[in-house]
C-alpha cells in the first residue's frame, strides 16, 4: 500500500459499505491525498452521517451530491471537483456505487433490470466520460512513462458474480440483472482500457470479495470478508498495478477473476 500515492481521488457511493471504507483508509494513510472526494446521493441525509463526521475532522475530504444514474448530477460533480483541483487533475476515479435487486430469473422486470444497469453499468460509463479531462490532466502532470493508479486510473467495482466462466454463488442467488450488469461493466472496463491507454490512464475491474455490507448481507448468509480486510487488500492490489494490468479483472487478493 505504501506504493499508492495519489494527490486526489473520487469514490462514488461513499456514504456506507466499501465506499466509506475506502474513504476512511485513504484519510488514514501516512501521506493522505490532498483531496478526497466522496460522492453520495444525499450528503446531508441520515445515511451520510459517518461521512459528515469524517469531513468535520478532515478538511481534505469533500462530500459531493452525486447520483450516478443522473447525467446532470455527474456533470455538476465534475465541475465542482475541477474547481477544487484548480489546475491539477484527478488521479483516481473509483466507480463504487452499485445496486442489487434480490430477484430470480423468472421475476426480473424491465423496470428493475433497467435501474440496475443504469446505476451499475451506464453510471461508470458516464463518470468516465465526465471525468476524462481531469484524469488526462493528472496523467500529463505525472512524471515518467507507463500506467499506474498513482498516476491516473479508473477502477470499476465489479463482482465475481459477473463472471461468465464461473458465476459466483449461483446456488445462493440468481440476481440475474446484477450479474448481467457486472458482466457488461467488465466489457466497459476493457473498452475504457483500450480507449484511454493512449491518454496514460489505467483501467481495471475489481472484485472486492463477498463483503459484510448491507448489499452483501441482503442474501441471507453472512459474507466471509469484512469491509476492513477487503479495502486493505484492494489498496494493496491497486498499489501494485502497472501497464500490463490495464483492462484486467483482479480480486481483492490480487488473483485474476475469469471473464
Image (tube, grey):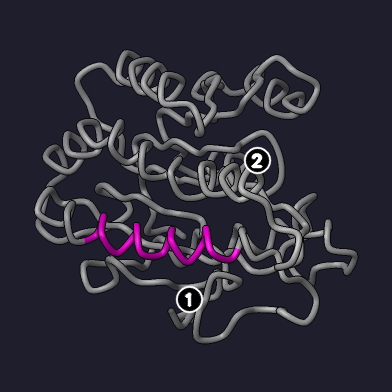
Residue at numbered disc 2: 20
Dot 2, crowdedness within 10 Å: few (<14), some or many (≥20)? many
Tell me the magenta residue range: 179-193
Query: Would you say 143 lies left or right of 13 here?
Result: left
The circle on residue 254 is: 1
Pinpoint residue 209: horizontal percent, then vertical percent: 64, 69
Dot 1, crowdedness within 10 Å: few (<14), some or many (≥20)? some
Between disc 2 and disc 1, whose residue precedes? Answer: 2
Dot 1: what SS?
Answer: loop
Residue 136 shown in magenta? no
In which quadrant of the rendered image does the C terminus lie?
A: bottom left
Pinpoint residue 60: horizontal percent, then vertical percent: 49, 23
Residue farthest toward the right in the current orientation of the protein:
220
Dot 2: what SS?
Answer: helix
- Tell me the residue at 87%/67% (across/down): 222
Query: Would you say 229 lies left or right of 64 here?
Result: right
Q: In this orientation, does residue 29 appear?
A: yes
Amino acid at each position: 500500500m505504501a506504493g499508492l500515492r495519489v494527490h486526489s481521488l473520487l469514490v462514488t457511493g461513499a456514504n456506507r459499505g466499501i465506499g466509506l471504507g475506502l474513504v476512511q483508509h485513504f484519510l488514514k494513510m501516512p501521506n493522505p491525498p490532498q483531496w478526497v472526494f466522496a460522492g453520495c446521493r444525499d450528503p446531508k441525509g441520515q445515511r451520510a452521517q459517518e461521512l459528515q463526521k469524517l469531513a468535520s475532522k478532515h478538511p481534505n475530504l469533500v462530500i459531493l451530491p452525486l447520483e450516478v444514474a443522473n447525467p446532470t448530477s455527474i456533470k455538476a460533480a465534475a465541475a465542482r471537483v475541477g474547481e477544487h483541483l484548480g489546475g491539477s487533475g484527478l488521479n483516481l476515479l473509483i466507480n463504487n456505487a452499485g445496486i442489487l435487486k434480490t430477484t430470480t430469473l423468472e421475476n426480473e422486470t424491465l423496470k428493475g433490470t433497467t435501474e440496475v444497469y443504469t446505476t451499475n453499468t451506464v453510471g461508470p460509463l458516464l463518470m468516465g466520460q465526465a471525468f476524462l479531462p481531469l484524469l488526462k490532466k493528472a496523467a500529463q502532470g505525472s512524471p515518467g512513462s507507463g500506467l499506474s493508479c498513482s498516476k491516473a486510473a479508473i477502477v470499476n467495482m465489479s463482482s465475481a458474480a459477473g463472471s461468465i466462466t464461473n458465476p459466483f454463488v449461483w446456488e445462493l442467488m440468481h440476481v440475474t440483472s446484477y450479474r448481467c450488469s457486472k458482466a457488461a461493466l467488465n466489457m466497459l472496463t476493457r473498452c475504457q482500457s483500450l480507449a484511454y491507454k493512449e491518454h496514460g490512464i489505467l483501467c481495471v475491474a475489481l472484485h472486492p470479495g463477498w463483503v459484510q455490507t448491507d448489499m452483501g448481507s441482503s442474501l441471507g448468509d453472512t459474507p466471509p470478508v469484512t469491509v476492513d480486510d477487503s479495502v486493505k487488500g484492494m489498496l494493496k492490489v491497486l498499489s501494485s498495478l502497472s501497464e500490463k494490468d490495464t483492462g484486467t479483472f483482479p480480486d481483492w487478493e490480487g488473483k485474476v477473476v475469469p471473464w
